[in-house]
Image: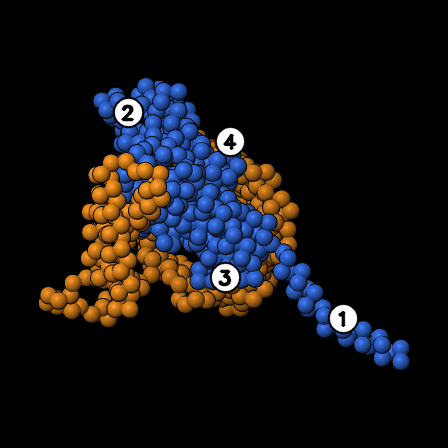
Amino acid sequence: MAVLATLAFAPCVAAQTPSDSLSLEVQRLRLLLDSLALEVARLSGGATPAQAQTELERLRAAAAAAAAAGGVGAPPDTADAQEFVGRERSLQDLNPEISVTGDVFGQVITDDPRQENFFAREFEVSFVSNLDPYSRAKVFLSRHAPGGEIQPFPGAEEEEHAEVGVEEGYVEWVGLPAGLGLKLGRFHQQFGQLNRWHPHALPSQSRSLPHLTFIGEEALAQTGASVYWLLPVGGGGRGTYQATFEFTTSENETLFGESNRPSVLGHLNGFWILSSSIDLDLGLSWLNGSYEDETSFFDRNLFGAEMALTWRPPAQALYRGVTVRGGVMALDGLAAGAGADRAWGYWGSVEARLSQQWLVGGRADRVENPADPSETAWLVAPTLTWWQSEYVRLRVEYDLQGLGAANDTEGRVLLQATFAVGPHRHEQY
Amino acid sequence: MAPAILIGVLSLGWGLGPFVASAAAQQAPVRVVTTLPVYASLVREIGGSDVEVSAIADPGEDAHFVRPRPSFALDLRRAEAFVTTGLDLELWVPTLLDRAGNPAVLEGGRGYITAYTGIRLLEIPATADRSQGDVHIFGNPHLTTDPLRALQVARNVATGLRRVAPDRAAVFDRGLQSFTDRIHRRLFGDRLVETLGGPTLEQMALNGTLFDFLETNELGGARLIDQLGGWLERAEPFRGRQMICYHRDWAYFEERFQVRCADYVESRPGIPPTPGHVAELIRHMQDEGIRVLLSPTYYPRNQVEAIANRGSATMVYVPFAPGIAGVGDYFELVDAWVDGLARAFSGG
């Protein structure tokens, strides 16, 4: 066996460079000699004590030969190559990571079951890549189709056609001095935590009523610069703090009308690990800009505070966990005739993991109408979610929505299917 | 005169200050963050008291599904070295690295260390197709189930630490040397290591010639295979046998200890079992007489237990990282795997 291994090793040795080959050849022949001697010793019977050391040395040589087997690869034989292939035109490996997500749903409105009820709400294509050693680029193109939206208050304008657009597109620098990070482009802004999440990743099918009312159906996404700073203090139970400052356009029509003045956003987030299973996340946000249309111009502020409390025992995290979220938003600066200066909104949700695939949850929202804060809308929505795999999720949700008094209600059952193609990574943090 | 002396003393203090600070800094341990607790254990073996190490994943947690928390980004901000598998296991790493914004531990940074470097990977899929489940496109990333691959991870750690703190290279070299010797002795046993040398045995084990060599050679009239010690000797009850595994965590353990996962509780990697798959799995266990089911503790115990009971198998429910269930370091972790399986296969 050792002899065979040594012989098998022989052609590999010839693969070395000329300067190496002579010494390797000598080594190979020595190993061959040693292993042959070992075989002779083996075949001739037991060794005397005086021979033991020699036998051991030979055994070690044979073992070294066996150990070297397969350790040196032969060079490819190119003598018969008929064609040489250049790769200058085949740089596909440098393409960005490309992912596609789809978010479709069907609904049955309990009062009007015949209403059109299937919607391909969003298809999103994302491109993510490093640009150079210092920066990354992320671009999310989406086709958003109208239909099935929650309208907190009647009379709001509805989209009529599907729109294709850049949901986000930005370059991000990480590793700047003092631990700063910088984004330039169009991005989901750091107003609370969930605003940065794309719709297919939300814990229920739509954003909260305060968000829908004060910001609109889409995430708050505007063009500009975002600087964030992870404060170099605390850690673990002592808290981890991040401050974000954003300077952007005022593209959001719900908030800013036709204003072309800049808006600024500040966000402070604190995160505490209370135990190995429990953590608490608290955030404060403030957005300032000005509302402008044909008849009015006034300063506008949107304030937000939100929390998330998560219980997730690490050893059972695949199949157990509860997350409780809640928040309050206040829109300061209402149109003349609103009868008040400020409109408030509140939301809360809970989601519990029952197994690796099943989650149950629910949310309750309440919001005041910015056009008339004495008018309120509310929503209660239990959900049941099934993860077929990491890339396919089905959800059933019942939305009970009301205006003011509880007897003015509308209900609907909604089935949502979400899927991801490609290397999509959902960045919760 | 007095002002001149004062100025002289101040100047001396000013001039020596940086050197004093530098000397103090040299005494401070190297701050290391690892993705997995098992890598943290290896860093401790190499660096001893010259490193201060923390792991992001909890010892009881499935590495695939760690939730990136802001505090981890702060840990990475402060780190001088960062150890990660470097494959598609910890997909939560890029988010944390970007948030931490620490160039020293970003990909390509001086303190960025990948565990997989220099390791021959197994189970590289022929095609990256998710109909096969949650496939790892570069190959199986659960490297440290093989003590020899864990040794290569330790070598990578030592390389990275020497780069980060060259003034303490001798410390890391000594740590690596000691760890290497301990792995060799714990895997092959003292007698074989003294007879043939740890590096030779390691090479034979890696190229698959070890058992053939031991079975066909002898010393002083005694077969070498009878001199096998350590984990490989303790693994004799299951060498060449079959078992059921929950997930494809064990590919490298299978190769090293010559045991085979004949089937899996998951219907495909990362896809929870369906009732139909469980029924088929139990039939398979009964038809083939497979009597052992191996699972890390982060899978639901009652599910693993129920399947083991239905298939008349013994459940081996073991930690997958040091730091839980009384397992303090990497050696005790492999002890738990080998002894757990040996007992189960011996009917204990």
- Amino acid found under the numbered disc labelled 3: Arg
Task: Give the mark nearest the N terminus, 3 or 4.
Answer: 3
Is circle 2 on the same chain as circle 3?
Answer: yes
Q: Which residue is mark 1?
A: B13
- Find the distance from the CA under tag 3 to the CA under tag 4: 35 Å
Q: Quadrant of residue A143?
A: bottom left
Is circle 2 on the same chain as circle 4?
Answer: yes
Of tags 3 and 4, which is closer to the observer? Answer: 3
Q: Colour of chain A?
A: orange
- Disc 3 chain ID: B
Q: Residue B247 at what x, y percent from top left? A: 34, 36
Q: Which residue is mark 3?
A: B163
- Amino acid found under the numbered disc labelled 2: Ile
Q: Quadrant of the C terminus of chain B?
A: top left
- Amino acid found under the numbered disc labelled 4: Ala
The kind of secondary structure element at disc 1 is helix
Do labels 2 and 4 touch, CB within 8 Å?
A: no
Q: Which residue is mark 4?
A: B325
Q: Which residue is mark 2?
A: B290
Do labels 2 and 3 touch, CB within 8 Å?
A: no
Q: Report the residue at 31% width, 64% height from top.
A: A94
Is circle 2 on the same chain as circle 1?
Answer: yes
Q: Residue B233 at what x, y percent from top left? A: 37, 32
